[in-house]
Image (cartoon, rainbow, N blue to C red):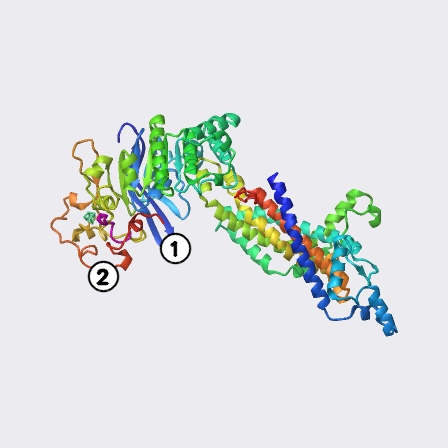
Amino acid sequence: MNQNTILSVDGLRTHFYTEQGVVRAVDDISFDVRQGEIVGIVGESGAGKSVATTSILRLIEEPGEIVAGEITYQDTTIVGFDERSDGTLVPKDEMLTNRQMRSQVRGNEIAIIFQDPMESLNPVYTVGNQLQEFIELNRDLSGSAAKKEGIDVLREVGIPEPEARFGDYPHEFSGGMRQRVLIAMALACRPNLIIADEPTTALDVTVEGQILNLVSDLQEEYGTSFIWVTHDMGVVAEICDRVNVMYLGKIVEQGPVDEIFYDTKHPYTKALLESVPRPDRTVDELNPIVGTMPSAIDPPRGCRFHTRCPDAREACREVDPQFVDVSETPDTEHRTACIKYDDVGYWDSVPLEHASEQDTSYIDEDQRPENRDLEQTEGEP
Amino acid sequence: MTLLRYTISRFVQAIPVLIGISFITFVMVNALPGDPVAIMLEGQEVDRETIEAVERRYGLDRPFHERFVTYMLGLVQGDLGYSFHRDMPVSQLMWIRLGPTLMLVFSAFVFALVTAVPLGVLAAKRRNEPTDHVSRLVALVGVSTPSFWIGIMLILIFAVWLGWLPSGRLVYPWRDPAHYGFDGRLELYYQTIRHLLLPMVALGTLQMATIMRIERSSMVESLQEDYVQLARAYGVPERTILRKHAFRAAQLPIITIVGLNLSTALGGAVLIETVFEINGMGRLLIQSIQQLDYQVVMGVTIVLATIFVIGVIITDISYAYVDPRVSYGDRE
Ligand code: SF4
């Protein structure tokens, strides 16, 4: 663990006990966040990104449950288990109580910005009412001082005439302006870490650009750390320092953003990168990922990506890939979970008869690589 | 100011609705079988001349449209015609009968809201726990049991068997205590409540069950909204979430349903008034239909419809008051 680490997630598993079976939404993931950096969590929808971040705040609701792993924030244990002699896991004594989570962590240490700015503000209260409430709860300010702080933060995130807008209702703001309000809420609580859960997905590209710039500026000014959840590699390139690529409840590759982009190891990361529109490529050259992500109820055995991986071989169906360090230099901390980089017989095994190469006839017409548009791979539902 | 203008415009909009209602009522009552003059003069030896004289006197010899216009002109002046049977102006009769009905319906809604809202919130908070299952079962029984049956059962249990409460008639708090032989105001109010209790519960149970179901589902939905999740993520205590963040927006469907259910409550009042022998509009309607007292039937129908329209307007205004997204029609 690095000295500047403020949050560390180790072996986290969050499962949902549904009638259809156990959804292993997050299945053994580990990553950390250091002071003042923006860490990306990237992957298709359904990869478990949001579940991972809600687990950090312990906001998982029935039928979901954090079943294993440790989450440590600075010196406090947000999640931790002790193993009893009979093998069952019991929560650690030093784990924060729900009350402590509420009063010591949520808002004042770790704040969150949700994906949909339209749904994240209460329609029947004014923006100022909600902002002021959060400030009063999380900082030692009350009444007019909290209101003044709220107006200042609104000004800071670029809302014109913040004094007048303070008393307006959410429906009187545009989508981009609402997202600024939500960013203001997070900043106003002066947290150490802000979790941004796809905060720009619902916005159009111009507004998205503005918000990203705003966040970069504010991040420099306040030195706040961010966890930035997204499905968009373009956004990752723009603001993240380090990246975790998630696929079906697991992290498949993690490392500094340059390594991920220029020394890509995992076939899934490659596929994600190839599906991003770039100035040097035409739409025809885009190469979306074949097929859809399997269900997390009954994930494929072996490597979870083998059903869609262009490099899959027989061994990938059997071996569960472990994290391998693929760093070029000692402190890069570039890791990937693909048996191509491990010594477990990948190169001796036969390539899998694969949907993407041989037989595409069973795939629905609109699911074929040549017929799919970017939306279907990238779009959130 | 905008809310005031919205209120005024809603009342102005209601005028054509009320004219329409009066017209339909007038047509329907006129289409009813039975000759009012013959009924009025029943049992008397009369000749053609007398009948024609009576018809002329009450304007029954004139064509339909003329009679309608006359009726409407009377209506705007508060004249609802004359009841031959009761030998008094219909409007005066309405004034006497309106109080009991309004008191009954209003108290039934108060009872329903005061019980159903907290229970619904509790059920939503404890969803899928025993509390929730019990309250949902009670609500289901509540919506599927006819109110008159509940009324009869209440009378049997609390009036006949236990003898705790009176079985019928109301005591009116606006009357002089001496009229009932009570000692003073205090006893009058006490007796008012005692007498009102059973009919209020009988009429209010259906409303309570309906409101409880909606409150529960609305709160369940509201508790899952992003803005509630956001409040949780910022450390807002669960109590405040229930009371503030989830509660207010969840009341919008309740407001709507209270307005719409005013019609079932007024309909229910007709039965409850009959069961409990309350001399309100409902009982008057039933008696007047039996007596073919057309003027009264028409008057009651129009007054009840007006109450309903006013009720809907009041709910619309409350809705606009609670939900800032409702535009008052002067924007966009
Ligand atoms: S382990 Fe095999 S299937 Fe999985 S990503 Fe690597 S090559 Fe593809």
Badge 2 and badge 1 both on one subunit:
yes
Which of the chains bears the disc numbered 2?
A: A
Q: Is residue B63 left or right of residue B245?
A: right
Q: CA distance from mark 2 to mark 1?
A: 33 Å
Relative depth, front residue between A303 and A200: A200
Amino acid type at mark 1: Glu
Judged by depth in the image, the label closer to the viewer, 2 or 1, is: 2
Amino acid type at mark 2: Ser
In the image, residue B178 above or below residue B305: above
* Residue found 61% across the figure and 60% down from its top: B145
Is there any visible trace of residue B27 in the rendered image? Answer: yes
Q: Secondary structure at mark 1?
A: loop
* Residue found 85% across the figure and 74% down from its top: B48
The magenta segment: A284-293
Type of secondary structure dominating the magenta stretch = loop
Residue A109 at x, y percent in the picture: 39, 31
- Pointer 1: what residue? A19
Residue B212 at x, y percent in the picture: 57, 51
Looking at the image, which residue sits at the far left? A348
Q: Identify the image quadrant of residue A49.
A: top left
Q: Is residue B19 left or right of residue A309?
A: right
Mark 2 close to ligand 1, CB under 8 Å: no
Residue B64 at x, y percent in the picture: 74, 65
Q: Would you call the spot at circle 1 few (<14 residues within 10 Å), some (14-19), or many (20 or more)? A: few
Which mark is on residue A361? 2
Relative depth, front residue between A249 and A370: A370
Relative depth, front residue between A108 and B92: B92
